[in-house]
Image (tube, grey):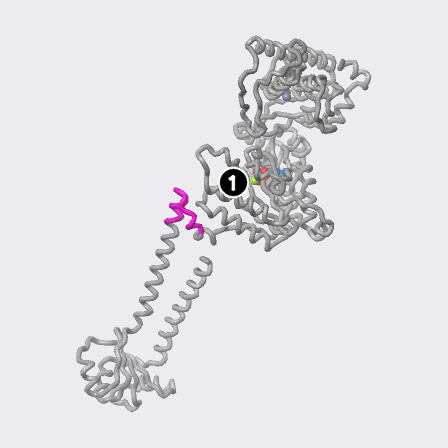
């Protein structure tokens, strides 16, 4: 509605201006200019009629052109050239109180007029109105951001909704490297956007929302754009942080606009960057609620629920903190498809460097594989930055090509910055992490009960995990036997014990493992009745609510003595497990070293490779017993 109003305002102003011009032109054209003295003479001789007395001018009509005695030949020629039957004239007015009397005396018809002032008035009125409207809007916007004004003001911000739409994206999958798994997962989305009819005909189920999860700089934004580029569809984008600064109602209106526009342009992609700024869990906010964010979030949920993915709109979002997102966002039918963007491994980093050095002139001594090996922990953005820095350094040194020296210096420079910012491990830390993860992986592989190891990595992930060992569950589990629980504990202790054996010292890196191991040992004693000394009783000490992170303490159901008995029993389980792990790792020390060595070299080792290192089955069985 506001839009229409503004439109007609412009039309109106245009019309006024046109009228103004027309009037001045027409009158200038038609009316001959005469002096006031001449006018008075004409009045005296009765050769005028229809006199109009304005504020600044008097005008009227000559009754005849037979006025040679009074007007000059030039002036008369004006009317002759016009060729009409009416001879309009105009004279600048002089203060003349007797004029009316004179006109009456000569029986000349006359009228008064407040000349053109209606026009002037109108213009000044409109100008001041516009001025106040602008001022008003500005003031309220200010107030709105400060204190959160009422919802009635939302109409102002509405037409302001700026949606960034790019219809031709040049970025393609070729520009994205080192995150091949994520790329693979998004191929399907590209296929759908390219030929939605094909999918619709087959009744295929298309994801509505795809959430890209990864550390800053891993290429989430880039990848989303690349999907649009590959599929050649329009790309609507908005950043979650933009919404938060707005005043109440505007964010929600923008979301509505965004989806409205997107639906008209389907197939297309709607991308919401930094979703966490908007979709923070509603319960996290300590100071009550942030109305604006919540309204916007609710609107987003409404929009996501309200449309059929078959129209061909795919919603993508990016976040580096999926854990703080509101659970409602992750529910089925919303952002239920998650694509993880890991930090790239050596080979990935090399591939990213290749992408970014396509336009850079490299000296023959530059080996990108070596550059990649020197940049553990770097993400795509860091690598792009490194290439750029190196090129700048080379230019400053007036070189024709970028040399290895430039790369080295650039990496040093960025590492210093990055160490403060993100985790870039030093050599010693990398060794510790490599042995720690090898310890987990080796124990998991030699114990027959355990799921096979899929992948071991020492690429830091998130804030806490410096490396990880991924096990692939072979089947869903509903029950676990005692020996399985014991094996699981052994795997958890594997990391810590490997550090102990190799370095004779231990690090803080095992905290999470120990926590989990403690949980297992405690449950064995207090819940599953698996302790010999305490027997079949359960001693439920604390219950974890499935919905809350904080444990709910329930009153103790047992005596102090029992409590210390539980403690010592848990201690005993730990002692036995530790001994067992220590023995296993010492026996396989050579494999442990080899595995850690390979990890340090390549950062990622696949499960199959690890299994190839292990002795045959018979040996494993003996070792595990
Ligand atoms: P994020 O959105 O995850 O924080 P961006 O997509 O904004 O990261 O990445 C910033 C820049 O870093 C990109 O524009 C690109 O130049 C570079 N970059 C990041 N990841 C990659 C990658 N996987 N391949 C190539 N370039 C990358
Ligand atoms: Mg981004
Ligand atoms: Zn560990």
143 magenta-colored: yes
Q: Residue at x 53, y 51 (%)?
A: 257
Which sits in the foreground, 329 or 262?
329
Q: Percent position (x, y) of residue 591?
A: 74, 18
In the image, 354: left or right of 217?
right
Q: Quadrant of ligand 3?
A: top right
Question: Is residue 344 shown to the viewer in this render?
Answer: yes
Provide the residue span drawn in magenta: 139-154
Label 1 CB less than 8 angstroms from ligand 2? no
Which image quadrant for residue 206?
top right
The question of residue 253 being in magenta is answered with no
Local SS, label 1: helix
542 up-or-down from 378: above or below? above
Report the quarter where the C terminus lies.
Answer: top right
Q: Quadrant of residue 490?
A: top right
Prevailing secondary structure of the magenta residues = helix
Picture quadrant of residue 341: top right
Q: Nearer the viewer, residue 198 or 355?
A: 198
| Residue 188: % across, % down | 70, 44
Does any portion of residue 387 appear in the rendered image? no
Q: Which residue is mark 1?
A: 278
Residue 309 position within the rendered picture, expressed as x and y whole percent measured from the top left: 64, 48
Residue 170 at x, y = what percent?
62, 49
Q: Residue at x 60, y 49 (%)?
A: 307
């Amino acid at each position: 509605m506001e839009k229409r109003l503004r439109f007609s305002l412009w039309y109106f102003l245009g019309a006024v201006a046109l009228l103004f011009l027309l009037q001045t032109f027409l009158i200038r054209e038609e009316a001959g200019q005469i002096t006031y003295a001449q006018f008075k003479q004409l009045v005296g001789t009765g050769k005028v009629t229809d006199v109009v007395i304005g504020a600044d001018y008097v005008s009227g009509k000559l009754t005849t052109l037979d006025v040679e005695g009074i007007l000059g030949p030039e002036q008369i020629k004006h009317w002759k050239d016009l060729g009409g039957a009416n001879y309009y004239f105009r004279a600048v007015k002089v203060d003349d109180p007797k004029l009316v009397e004179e006109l009456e005396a000569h029986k000349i018809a006359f009228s008064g007029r407040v000349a053109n002032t209606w026009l002037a008035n109108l213009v000044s009125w409109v100008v001041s109105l516009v001025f106040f409207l602008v001022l008003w809007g500005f003031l309220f916007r200010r107030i709105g951001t400060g204190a959160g004004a009422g919802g009635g003001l939302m109409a102002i911000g509405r037409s302001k909704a700026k949606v960034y739409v790019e219809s031709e994206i040049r970025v393609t999958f070729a520009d994205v490297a080192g995150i091949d798994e994520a790329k693979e997962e998004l191929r399907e989305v590209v296929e759908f956007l390219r030929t939605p009819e094909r999918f619709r005909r087959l009744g295929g189920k298309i994801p509505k929302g795809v959430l890209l999860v990864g550390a800053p700089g891993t290429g989430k934004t880039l990848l989303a754009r690349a999907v649009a580029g590959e599929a050649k569809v329009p790309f609507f984008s908005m950043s979650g942080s933009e919404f938060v600064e707005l005043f109440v109602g505007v964010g929600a209106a923008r979301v509505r606009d965004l989806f409205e526009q997107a639906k008209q342009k389907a197939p297309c992609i709607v991308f919401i960057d930094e979703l966490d700024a908007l979709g923070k869990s509603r319960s996290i906010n300590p100071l009550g609620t942030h109305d604006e964010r919540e309204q916007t979030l609710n609107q987003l949920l409404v929009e996501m629920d309200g449309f059929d993915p078959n129209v061909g709109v795919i919603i993508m979002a990016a976040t580096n903190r999926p854990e703080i997102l509101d659970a409602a966002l992750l529910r089925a039918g919303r952002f239920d498809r998650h694509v993880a963007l890991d930090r790239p491994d050596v080979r990935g980093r090399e591939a990213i460097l290749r992408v970014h050095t396509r336009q850079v002139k490299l000296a023959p001594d530059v080996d990108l594989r070596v550059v990649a090996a020197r940049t553990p922990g770097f993400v795509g953005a860091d690598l792009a930055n490194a290439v750029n820095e190196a090129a700048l350094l080379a230019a400053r040194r007036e070189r024709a090509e970028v040399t290895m020296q430039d790369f080295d210096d650039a990496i040093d420079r960025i590492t210093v910055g990055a160490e403060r910012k993100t985790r870039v491990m030093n050599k010693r830390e990398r060794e510790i992490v490599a042995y720690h993860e090898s310890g987990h992986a080796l124990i998991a592989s030699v114990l027959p009960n355990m799921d096979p190891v899929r992948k071991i990595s020492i690429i830091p992930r998130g804030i806490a995990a410096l490396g990880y060992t991924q096990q692939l569950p072979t089947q869903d589990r509903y029950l676990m036997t005692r020996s399985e629980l014991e094996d699981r504990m052994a795997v958890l202790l594997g990391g810590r014990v490997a550090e102990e054996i190799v370095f004779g010292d231990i690090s803080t890196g095992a905290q999470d493992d120990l926590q989990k191991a403690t949980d297992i040992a405690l449950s064995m004693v207090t819940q599953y009745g698996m302790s010999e000394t305490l027997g079949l009783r359960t001693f439920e000490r604390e219950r974890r609510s499935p919905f809350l992170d904080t444990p709910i303490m329930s009153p103790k159901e047992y005596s102090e003595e029992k409590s210390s008995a539980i403690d010592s029993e848990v201690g005993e389980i730990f002692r036995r497990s530790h001994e067992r792990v220590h023995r296993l790792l010492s026996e396989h020390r050579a494999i442990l070293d080899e595995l850690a060595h390979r990890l340090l070299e390549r950062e990622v080792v696949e499960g199959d490779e690890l299994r190839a290192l292990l002795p045959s089955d018979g040996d494993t069985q003996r070792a595990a017993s």
